[in-house]
Amino acid sequence: MTEAVRTTAKDGVLTITLDRPKANAINVATSRALYAAFQQLQDDPALRVAIITGTGRFFSAGWDLGAATEGEAIDADHGPGGFAGLTEYFSLDKPVIAAVNGLAFGGGFELALAADLIIAADHVEFALPEVKLGMIPDSGGVLRLPRRLPRAIATELLLTGRRMSAQEAARWGLVNQVVPAETLMAAAQELAASIVHNAPLALAAVKQVLRETEGQTLAQAYQTLRSGTLSSYQAMLSSDDAQEGPRAFGEKRPPRWSGS
């Protein structure tokens, strides 16, 4: 990891901290460092879930406009995983929690949207201000936001670039929790711990089924589910863990997951 991206691992949780003063802006090098962190999550069987957070006033201000003045193109290759290492990392089969500690603007908001769950500090504001800069949020904002909010609200945010408070985000169901800033990481760690205790193959299957059936009708989604083409789902069905869970329940003991 670079100094801009720090990781710590404990009890199955990988905490990824973006620390790039003053605004945790993301250039190509930082994107690639973030991807390396998410790849660490994917590759290490001892890791079950990640928390991505930032330091200071910002979660992230998004794309580093300073890098643009130094020649980094608006469509620069941010490497595997796309911008911020996560926005196009579609094969990641372990959950990611965004613990949004501060302002999440532009690509910072898109990074949070790419996570599976979002916990926000109560003073946080979200915005996609790209139209004010002659651009659009094409690292997922223009694609993901209309899937997560009522279309009229998403379109308003995209066309105006206005700020949305954490409380408004919660009203629309965009974030899972809004908590006081001083309890943000504790809340994120508590949520992560509740995930870690579950079967890893089942978690991967949930992510794959959600990903592959998004946008389908219910009938189409059932066809996809029963098609035999969802590798994580199939692996879960035939796993030892799928037998261990009911056995442990019957024996009134905690399950011992093997991940196989």
Image (spheres, helix red, strand yellow):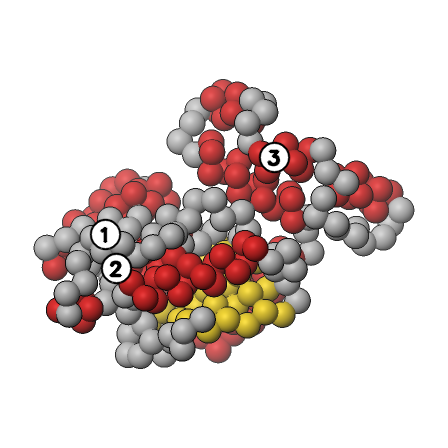
Callout 3 crowding tier (Cα within 10 Å): few <14, some 14–19, many ≥20: many
Which numbered dot is residue 233?
3
Residue drawn at the location 55% of the way across and 72% of the way down: 8
Tell me which label, 2 or 3, sits earlier in the chain. 2
> Which residue is the site of mark 1?
137
Callout 2 crowding tier (Cα within 10 Å): few <14, some 14–19, many ≥20: many
Tell me which label, 1 or 3, sits earlier in the chain. 1
The amino acid type of the residue labelled 1 equals Pro
**Helix, strand or loop under label 3:** helix
Q: Quadrant of residue 151?
A: top left
Cα distance, mark 1 to mark 3? 32 Å
Cα distance, mark 2 to mark 1? 7 Å
Residue drawn at the location 52% of the way across and 68% of the way down: 15
The amino acid type of the residue labelled 3 equals Tyr
Which numbered dot is residue 106?
2
Query: Up-down: is 112 above or below 212?
Result: below
Front disc: 2 or 3: 3
Front disc: 1 or 3: 3
Residue drawn at the location 32% of the way across and 72% of the way down: 24
**Helix, strand or loop under label 2:** loop
Query: Up-down: is 120 above or below 151?
Result: below
The x, y position of residue 236, in whole percent, is 67, 37
Cα distance, mark 2 to mark 3? 34 Å
Counting every numbered tag in the picture gives: 3
